[in-house]
Amino acid sequence: MAIQKPSHTLAKIHLKALRTKSLHILFTLSFTMFINMFCFAQELPNSKDPIKPKTVTDTISVSVDSLLAPPLNIKEIDSVKKDSVPKKNELLSDIVNYKAKEYVRLNQRKNQTTLYNEAEVNYQDMNIKAGIITIDHSKNLVYAGRLKDSAGVYSQRPVFTQGPSVIEPDSIIFNTKTKKALIFNSRTEQNGGTIIAEKTKMENDSTLFIQNGKFTTSDNLDDPEYYFLLRKAKVVPGVKVVTGLTNLFIYDVPTPIGLPFAYFPMSKKQTSGVIMPTPGQELANDRGYFLQNGGYYFAISDYLDLAVLGDYYTNGSYGLRLESNYATRYKFNGNLSFRYENLINSEPGFPDFAKSTIYNIRWSHSQDAKSNPSSRFSASVNLGSSQYYRQSINQLNLASSQNNTLASSISYSKTFQGEPQVNMNVTATHSQNTNTEQINMTLPTLQGSVSRVFPFEPKTGIKKGIIQNINFQYNVRAENRIQTTDSLFFKSEMFDDARVGAVHSIPISTNFKVFNYFSMSANANFEENWTLNTINRFYDQDTEEIITEDLSQFDRFFTYNFGTSIGTTIYGMFDFEKEGKDPLIQKIRHVMRPSISYNINPAFDNYYDTFEIVNADGTTADEAERVEYTRFEGALFGVPTKTFSSSMGISLGNNFEAKVRDSDSTATEPKKIKLLNNLNFSTSYNFAGDSLQWSPLRVSGGTTILKDKMNINFGMVLDPYALDNNNRKIDQFNISNGGSLFRLTSANLNLSYSISSKEFEGGSDEEDRGIQDNLRSGGRADDLFGRPQDFADQRLNDDDKKDKKEEPSEFYNYKIPWSLRLAYAVNYTNSTRQNTISSNSLMFSGDIDLSPRWSVGASSGYDFVGKGFTQTQLRFERDLLSWRMNFTWVPFGPYNQWNFFIGIRSNLLKDLKYDKRKQRDQQL
């Protein structure tokens, strides 16, 4: 039988157990504190010893629970289940990581830790780097400041980072508990702009409250060229800046340009927003006051945006523009632009009143070659009103105004791999003459081809001989061609005269060697033409007229031709080297490539019909009045040949190179230069012709000189036949008529030269002078006709640093960059004894930096035939650091106008600008 102990004895046992556990807890706490103090003492430097630089990296992890022993389970022996004393919150809720280069010192009396020289503290999302950092554990504060040397120079400015906010102040006080901070003399970068503030208070969500701050985009933060004084402002990093009264200061001089309040969006992502218009007044055409280039920007996604801009004039004129850019990395990118202007000159009732509408559509699309190697889509579209570039009042594009052609092309190509390979291409093209306003379009053009097939090639090894090299392929081309005018463009009438046709061709060819030195080829071509446009022609006795009917029905004709050619390459060498002498020109190599071809084109007169002209009395007219025609006159790809042709073609290509002594004495090999890149002669003889069997001799050539900086191209046409007294060609050689062997009928010479100061400095001229915009508008690939200025695009360009120049040297005239471009063209005409220079002009364009920040340029030319200057443009530009200023002037001509602009470079403040321009006079 078990003996039960008294209750008072059990209570003593419980009290003894509690006392033992309490002593164990106190011992554990004391031992832990002793170990921690001993560890800190090991890290503190001895006051008697000099401080040696060393890097100390410590981690403080303070947790009250870690200092306590495991709790007693006294549920069964104690009636008290819950302590009435509330548990204190921990001093730090996370680990504090800190380090310093010199030392880390702990002051136990003040409960502070000091980090000296290149100090850094990390706590949760907060990071502080500074010269000196003091952590006050009792107040949950972190002090950070700069270091001061014996000369009184401060260094190691604090850098405070919390979340997206980065601040560079002189000093900072941060509360680790509330995550609030007090910042002095801070510099905060916000999406291209910088805020300089004397005193800043930061909330725990990184929101900044600023007093007496400066907002600028200048690179020189110690002495900014300009700033907006923010007397009281709120900054949400990466989102916005909201301020009260603010005004513009230029080099600390206040200006009256200001606002009672302001809002600056600071989103790092694309953000939709209002685009402020530009006010002004136009007096040239009495359009009155205007607001230009105002609208809204839509940030649709990361891959697509849209800007809607508009103009309005008080006389009723208006304009609309849509600008969109899109891109998908590694796939494709492009841009789309639509512009429409409704222009009213003067006022109704006045004699100079006029009204017109112009428009322009531009689309550029390019596909990454690696996205889909077997399929490709591209677009280059530039279409619209023929007079757009000459009448638009929201741009100055002299280069495009001188271009007579607008061209567009949209194509899709697909390759089907296999043996043989099949290629398909669908293209829509557009060609527009801005002078005649004629438009030619293909909607669409379908092209297909099958790669060459060698039916007799060996299974292994290379192909040899005439049989093994026999090959054929298949090609097809189908078109829907439209010819219309500017006035009927985009109207249903433009499709009335559309022509549809297709041509199928099977070329068969082979090639082989003759006598080991001659390459000979033979070919035959078979074509099948399909058309939906034919005619029927007859004589109407009632009206006594020849009637031509257009028939929209399917018809076809088949043609073929044969040809062969033989050619070789001849190498010649002129050696000028002599023993004991080192001439300047050591060798000249002459390469000749003669070729003779023979072609036969049969006559397909079976596709030709005749009809008779019958008199009113019913009798037939004489044979001279019989009319012959072919029903395929309306065919898209031409008509079948009516006459037999048997012709021989003769051509000779030449190339001249020389080896000259190198000016570098250390060079061991002579220098190779090109004397003539090419010199070509070509003519033909028609064996089946009754007269004028020889065709004119055509000569063309070209070369480059002056280190390939000058291109020279020339050409001429020499006719062997003479002219009669009426300047008509006769079947008699010119030499037999008392003249020379050939009669010069036309000639041309073109020279272009480009040089810049960078070439003398060992660099290259990579400046973008608006060439891309010139090409996109259908203009020249240079600025000889002037540089374009698109006033609507200034605010849409997001690269605000691309036109910043290199920081100038402290030495005046250390560098004077310059560039020069020249182009000369002359044409001679003498086909009917005119003996005149039809055109003779010199064009030039140049730029020079007169000082480190002043640049001037000009584009002009002189017409020696018309004896006058061509289109002229003068340019002046001043680099104002954070600002830019330019003045463009067309002093004379139909585009006489000028434009002055001064504004801030940064996209953030591009609306802060002054733009004044004089429009060109009205052209009646």
Image: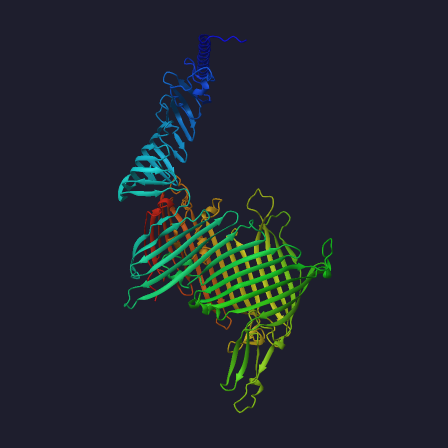
In the rendered image, which quarter is residue 921 located in?
A: bottom left
Q: Residue visible at 50% across and 78% down?
A: 726
Q: Nearer the viewer, residue 54 or 261?
A: 261
Q: Residue visible at 35% across and 30% down?
A: 180
- Residue at the outermost bottom position: 617
* Left or right placement of residue 172 versus residue 564 in this view: left
Q: Position of residue 728 (x, y in %)?
A: 53, 76
- Res 788 visible: no
Q: Nearer the viewer, residue 719 or 573?
A: 719
- Residue at the outermost front position: 1
In the rendered image, which quarter is residue 249 located in?
A: top left
Q: How many numbered circles are shown?
A: 0
* Left or right placement of residue 696 versus residue 335 in this view: right
Q: Position of residue 235 (x, y in %)?
A: 34, 38
Q: Position of residue 909 (x, y in %)?
A: 35, 45
Q: Is 756 rendered above or below residue 558?
A: above
* Left or right placement of residue 417 versus residue 907 in this view: right
- Res 579 visible: yes
Q: Nearer the viewer, residue 397 or 692?
A: 397
Q: Is 766 rendered above or below residue 210?
A: below
Q: In which quadrant will I find the N terminus?
A: top right
Q: How is the image coloured?
A: rainbow
Q: Nearer the viewer, residue 742 or 305?
A: 305
Q: In which quadrant will I find the C terminus?
A: bottom left
Q: Residue visible at 60% across and 65% down?
A: 682
Q: Position of residue 626 (x, y in %)?
A: 57, 84
